[in-house]
Amino acid sequence: MRTVDAGRTYLSSTFFTAGDACLNHLLKPFLSTYNIPTSIPTISRSSRRLIIRDDKATASKYISDYIISRLKAFAPTPEKPFVLGLPTGSSPEGVYKNLVAAHKQGEISFRNVVTFNMDEYVGIPREHPESYHSFMYNHFFSHVDVDPANINILDGNAEDLEEECIAYEEKIKRAGGIELFLGGIGPDGHIAFNEPGSSLRSRTRVKTLAYETILANSRFFGNDLSKVPKMALTVGVQTVLDAREVVIIITGPHKALAVQKCLEGGVNHMWTLSALQLHPYALIVVDEDATLELQVKTVKYFKSIELVASSQGFGQGLESGEAVGKKRDSVLERLDSPSSPRKMGEGFLAAPGEGRPGVKRAVTPELVPDSMHERLPEDGVEEEKKVELGAM
């Protein structure tokens, strides 16, 4: 339940259902009055968005459908693969399940996809059932047609861990950067293993795990804290921010406080997910339970945005960098064309009087800096003023 102003209390599901229906009802006359088309081409998303779904299953379905649509639109080839960042843990399990099902139904292929995982424990064998290598093969890689040569996971048993981290960053760079980074968060708002207090400019590195994270992960090790690895290799916050797009799934009431801090609070290294406020293409998908700490108006705001966008045919699609680059080149070509009224030095960018007959403006006098003591009267002048005042 949620409390709204004046002490009124509403059951959240009833309140939002009624609100959405009301907004939808209000939109119809608005659209018809101003002759706004109800179906227009999908446009690129250019801001942080929050998508709210009823439960974990529907949130997972939304993300898996989105990833499939992005892959199809990108049309990867061996020369131009789609570079996908991937997480582990319980949050993305439903997403992987849906992606595997779509592949088996022939809906999507991962043949030309290059993957980079977020993290891996230090010190446990790759074949250990709780290693992230095992997790990824059990839940995803073994069930799709991804080329094993295109799979990249940090090696927590490398002879030189720092060298392994440097090499990982270089591999990402040589792959052309990550097109879409999928992730989840911990109850304390950490993304990958970037625990509270991590630098928001951090890169792939060795990280000591917080007690809260060790405690949360103990469920995978028979609730025996002594068996849980205490260190891990992880991509940095800046590594994630460098991705062209970041998609985060957050579910459950135990992560509601983290959602509130990261969405309604400011950018804070104690809640590393909050760094996504600085990313131009961040998509956060949550279930209703994860919104329990948010203000009612925040939830209504994001739900209304999705409702209005849907009514206008706006999608969440993000055009490929190549397509955006072509548009930019086309715009620059038009602006630089001799016939363009907006060519540099002409039109709205011209200085007053340049290329504009009859437009003149007085020249601003040059500023001559002085010192404060130069503004004070000299002693002799001050004495003369005192004499004059005394004679009055």
Image (cartoon, rainbow, N blue to C red):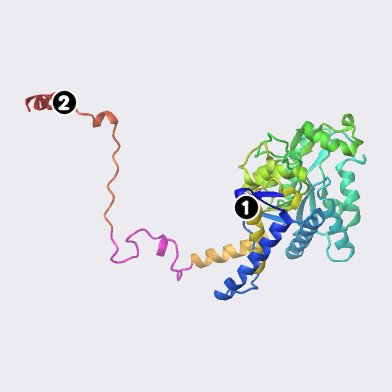
The one nearer the camera, 26 or 104, is: 26
Magenta-colored stretch includes residue 203: no
The one nearer the camera, 383 or 262, is: 262
Q: Please name which of the two marks, 1 or 2, marks the residue nearer to the observer.
A: 1
Residue 125: x and y, percent?
A: 91, 37
Residue under pointer 1:
297
C-alpha span from label 1 to label 2: 65 Å
**In this rendering, is residue 306 above or below 272?**
below
Q: Which mark is residue 382?
A: 2
Q: What secondary structure characterizes most of the magenta part?
A: loop
Residue type (three-letter) at the residue carrying disc 1: Lys
Residue 230: x and y, percent?
A: 82, 31
Residue type (three-letter) at the residue carrying disc 2: Glu
Q: Residues within 10 Å of mark 2 (few under 14, many from 20)?
A: few
The quadrant where residue 27 appears: bottom right
Q: Residues within 10 Å of mark 1 (few under 14, many from 20)?
A: few
Q: Is residue 179 visible?
A: no
C-beta proximity under 8 Å, tags 1 and 2: no
The one nearer the camera, 123 or 101, is: 101
The quadrant where residue 374 appears: top left
Q: Secondary structure at mark 1?
A: helix
On the rendered image, what quadrant is the C terminus found in?
Answer: top left
Query: What segment is highlighted magenta in the picture?
Result: 337-360
Labels 1 and 2: the sequence-earlier one: 1
Total count of labels: 2
Q: Secondary structure at mark 2?
A: helix
Residue 105: x and y, percent?
A: 89, 65
* Residue at 30% over, 37% down: 369
Magenta-colored stretch includes residue 348: yes
Residue 71: x and y, percent?
A: 76, 61
